[in-house]
Amino acid sequence: MPFVIALSVLVIELTPAHFIYTGPFLTAVPALAAVTMGPKRTALAAALALAVSATTATQNQAWGTLQVYTNFLALALVSVAGFITSSAVRAYRRSKLDQVRRIAVAAQEVILRPVPEHLGPVRTGSLSLAAGTGAQVGGDLYEAVQTRYGVRMIVGDVRGKGLTAMREVAAVLGAFRVVVHYEDDLVEVMNHCAAALRREAAVPGAHPEETLMERFTTALIAQVPNDEPVVQLVNRGHPSPLILHEGRTQPLTPTSACPPLGLEDLITGRPEKPEGYPFVPGDRLLLYTDGVIEARNPRNDFFPLPQTMESINFSTAPQEFLEQLHHALTSHAEGRLADDVAMIVADRLDEKERWSGSRHGMDGL
């Protein structure tokens, strides 16, 4: 609006309608900019208003008159006051937003705790990265737990953001953390997570009625048995994990597509048993959310996750591997991630490494 006003004044002064006194309109330009824009645009609007005022004074041959100098003085005073006000408001808003962000991040970290460095037959690492969308917490989730059945991991993505999404994240993770220890069937573990979401959706007032049918959660549960060189997967509409074997990546694509959690009543074809894939010592498994593969650069190219995995030195520890992957991801997107990111990496250990890791853990106790 401030720029529209300035251009309107210029049009009036350069047409037969120039008999209209436009000084007060130009004075409003920096004032409106201070309310609706930041300091830089306020200064730009003030400069534009001064330029228009100088142009109209020249056009009307009004230089030397008291009216011109009064207009310039008023513009200068309002511009300085507008710039100072805009800077103060920007600083106040940034301070409040940073405070809310810290609270949101703290709340999210309570639910999404880092996974342990060593779990039974695997060495693990985790990473959660917010997209920087204001103070809203995201809907990505992950967890890794050592059980009597082996190491069980989950990664998922709740549709939406904010407290509603975080409640659903808490419901899924709460169910997973409990049921993984006593349910031997991996499909039933996933079904318990789906049931937790249904219970959450049934709470009166938990979700707006118009969004209930649109809410769903993609999820992937992986199990690495203690003594069998495989990884077992149950995938409910989630991006396929990648396994790095002898320097080459391979997607672990399910044989049939299954619906995300929350869409069970709309689509048939739920998995009846987990699907198994080779996962031998020396292999590296990556579970991730779609914020990784959907990150784009300014040329609109997707992030080349498989090629990036292959380019990172395999000797790096899981957490260092994720940090290098994170650096490559943010460089590709030039720091502008459109969606949150969550990743878990697991390296399959041989017996010697497994025993060494277990002994190190006991020494730490």
Image (spheres, helix red, strand yellow):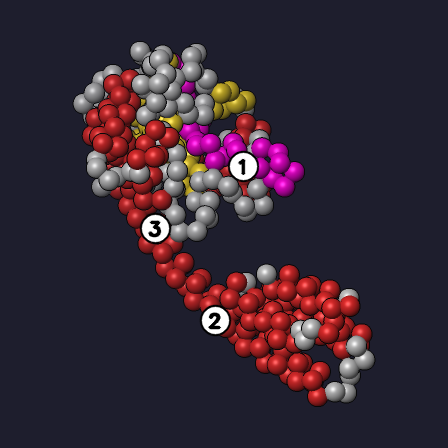
Q: Which mark is residue 88?
A: 2
User: Disc 1 marks which residue?
Assistant: 295
Q: Which percent across, then down, holds residue 224?
A: 33, 21
Mark 2 or mark 3, which is nearer to you?
2
Q: Which percent across, then down, holds residue 342?
A: 41, 37
Residue 21 appears in the rendering:
yes
Q: Residues within 10 Å of mark 2 (few under 14, many from 20)?
A: some
Residue at 73% across, 64% down: 11
Residue 252's image quarter? top left
Decide if residue 218 is on the left or right side of residue 358: right
Secondary structure under badge 3? helix
Q: Is residue 190 magenta?
A: no
Decide if residue 50 is on the left or right side of residue 134: right
Secondary structure under badge 2? helix
Decide if residue 211 is on the left or right side of residue 246: left
N-terminal-most mark, 2 or 3: 2
N-terminal-most mark, 2 or 1: 2
**Which residue range is magenta in the image?**
276-302
